[in-house]
Image (cartoon, grey):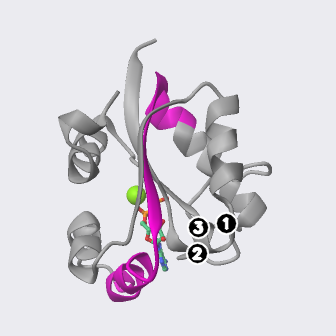
Amino acid sequence: MAIKQTLSMIKPDGVKRGLIGEVIGRFEKNGLKIKAMKMLHLTKAQAQQFYAVHQERPFYGSLTEFMSSGPIVALILEGENAIQVNRDLMGATDYRQAAAGTIRADFARDIEANIVHGSDAAETAKTEIAFFFNELEKV
Ligand code: ADP
Ligand code: MG
């Protein structure tokens, strides 16, 4: 199986609720290595750029408000099948449909404020990693 990298974000609700350590602990316990990490507060424009793929969706305005409402933690995770492993740890977008034991099932109580983001494919992982990190910031 290929070693792959993926981009994870702990969203403003996860940071506010003190879940950074909990979420990172789950990554580390499940074979995902942290290759880069930073905390930052996205502007609305940066959140709009990051989620540009969703710009036609009805929740785009609200989502980008939320994503720029407080600090986030961005991480590059690396491991075998990192993209899928991370998606499996996150659980479904809607916490009510997320499998038991996933981050969203355990902590999210809102479809929008759902604790974590994870890239959904190799191409998006590449773009999303480049959005947050330059070469000097990767180990
Ligand atoms: P995921 O984060 O699981 O990849 P999507 O890419 O479909 O999910 O959506 C991006 C983010 O937009 C979600 O994580 C969530 O914060 C928000 N979102 C998705 N669907 C809805 C919805 N129906 N109502 C409100 N917010 C939503
Ligand atoms: Mg997505």
55 or 16: which is nearer to us? 16
Mark 2 or 1, nearer chain start:
1
> Decide: marks 3, 2 in contact (CB < 8 A)?
no
> Which numbered dot is residue 111?
2
> Which numbered dot is residue 61?
none
- Crowding at dot 2, Cα within 10 Å, few <14 / some 14-19 / many 20+, comes out as some
Task: Give, as a single range, the part of the protein colored magenta.
Answer: 58-85
- Crowding at dot 3, Cα within 10 Å, few <14 / some 14-19 / many 20+, comes out as some
Q: Quadrant of the C terminus?
A: top left
Position in image of residue 68 (x %, y %): 38, 79
Asked if disc 2 is less than 8 Å from ligand 1, the answer is yes
- Residue shown at the point (58%, 75%) measured from the top left: 111
Q: Judging from the image, what secondary structure is the residue with disc 2 in?
A: loop
- On the image, which quarter does residue 136 sit in? top left
- On the image, which quarter does residue 114 sit in? bottom right
* Residue 71 visible, this angle: yes
Which of label 3 and label 2 is nearer to you? 3
Q: Judging from the image, what secondary structure is the residue with disc 1 in?
A: loop
Q: Which residue matches tag 1?
A: 95
Position in image of residue 126 (x %, y %): 24, 39
The kind of residue on which mark 1 rests is Tyr
